[in-house]
Image: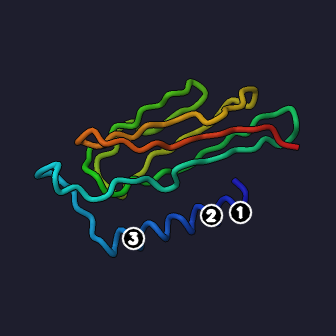
Amino acid sequence: MTSMHRLTLHAALLAAVVAVNACGVGNDDETAGSLTPFNIVPNASTFTGPNSTTCGTGTTRVFIFGGAGPYQIHNTSPELTVTPTTVNEPGQFFDVTAFDPTVCLTTASIVVVDKWGRQVVFNVTTSRGT
C-alpha cells in the first residue's frame, strides 16, 4: 500500500467517523422504517503491480457504518478473498485481498448486505504497473 493510498484511506476513515459521531449510530433492530444511512469506507480500492507484466495485489480493510447488523459480505470474484464473511455490528470491518498477480481485475465487486436486505458495493481493480 502506497503512502498516498494510506493517507487517502485515513482521511476517508476520519471523515466517516466524524459523520457517524455527528448523527449517532443506531443498530436499527426495531423496524426497517427507521434505518440510519448504510455505507462502507472506503467503497473501492485499486492495486497496481510493480511492473508492466504483473497485476496488483494487496489487502484493503473496509469499515461498515449504519444500517443494521449482522451484515453478510458476498464475494463475486474467485481472485479475491474476504475475511470475515459476516460482520455483526456497525463500525466493524472486513478485509478484501487481491492475491493473484497474473490476473488483472476490471472492477470486481464485493456486495455487503445488511439485516434488512439493503446493499452497498465495494469495487476492486487490479492493474499492471509501468
According to the picture, the residue beneath numbered tag 1 turns out to be 4
Disc 1/disc 3 C-alpha distance (Å): 23 Å
The quarter of the rendered structure image containing the C terminus is top right
Rate crowding at label 3 as few (under 14), some (14 to 19) or many (20 or more) other CA atoms within 10 Å: few
According to the picture, the residue beneath numbered tag 2 turns out to be 8
The kind of residue on which mark 3 rests is: Ala
The part of the image, by quadrant, that contains residue 5 is: bottom right
Residue at the image position 30 percent from the left and 71 percent from the top:
23
User: Are the residues flagged by discs 1 and 2 in contact, CB closer than 8 Å?
Assistant: yes
The part of the image, by quadrant, that contains residue 48 is: top right
The kind of residue on which mark 1 rests is: Met
Element carrying mark 1: helix
Taking the image as shown, residue 40 lies to the left or right of residue 103, namely left
According to the picture, the residue beneath numbered tag 3 turns out to be 19
Taking the image as shown, residue 66 lies to the left or right of residue 85, namely left
The residue furthest top is 78
Residue at the image position 44 percent from the left and 66 percent from the top:
16
Badge 2 or badge 3: first in the primary sequence = 2
Residue at the image position 29 percent from the left and 47 percent from the top:
88
Badge 1 or badge 3: first in the primary sequence = 1
Give x and y (percent) for residue 28: 19, 54
